[in-house]
Image (tube, grey):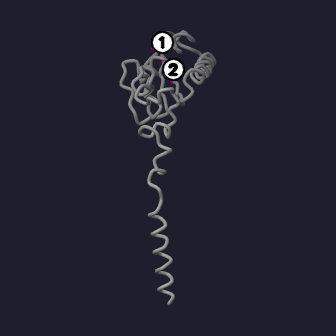
Amino acid sequence: MKHAILAIVVCSFFIAGCGADKDLTGQREVENGTRLIGVTDDDGSYEEHKDSNDFNTNQNPNFLDLTEERPDYGDDQEKFAEVITLNSDLEPGPVSITGDNARVTAYSNGSLSKEEKDKVERTLKRKFIDVMPRYRVHLTIKER
């Protein structure tokens, strides 16, 4: 008896589910789902937004920026050299970037005292933090 009642209840759920009006299911979706993705233009055209020149592909880090002007490690290395040139009498040397560590070398033309060397090193490290805050800078000052 319990099995018969359970079977009748299950069958009634199936019959009730199949009796829904099929036209109601697609009324919220308009023209290939453009309302669902938030396009609010007058014409509701999604393709127009996708093909415009202002479409920014740098929103997702998985999409590589393939333009010629894209920033890379070479730009960061040049920025370190520029900071050394503008803020001290030292000559920039090689810059090695590994992860978030930047190993920067600068060369002095003459001998520097310990106090002068420490002062220049503090000044440059402070400038490096201002200009390139994403790196931990390890500065080495050598004599030529």
Instruction: Give the image location of residue 29, x and y in percent.
Output: 47, 43
Name the residue type under label 2: Ile
Q: Residues within 10 Å of mark 2 (few under 14, many from 20)?
A: some
Residue on which the image places disc 2:
141
Along the horizontal axis of the image, is 47 left or right of 37? left
Instruction: Give the image location of residue 60, x and y in percent.
Output: 45, 34
Q: Quadrant of the C terminus?
A: top left
In the rendering, which numbered label is found on residue 34? none
The magenta stretch spans which residues? 140-144
- SS under mark 1: strand
Name the residue type under label 1: Glu
Instruction: Give the image location of residue 64, x and y in percent.
Output: 38, 30
- Residue found 56% across the figure and 14% down from its top: 112
Who is closer to the viewer here, 63 or 46? 46
- SS under mark 2: strand
The number of discs equals: 2
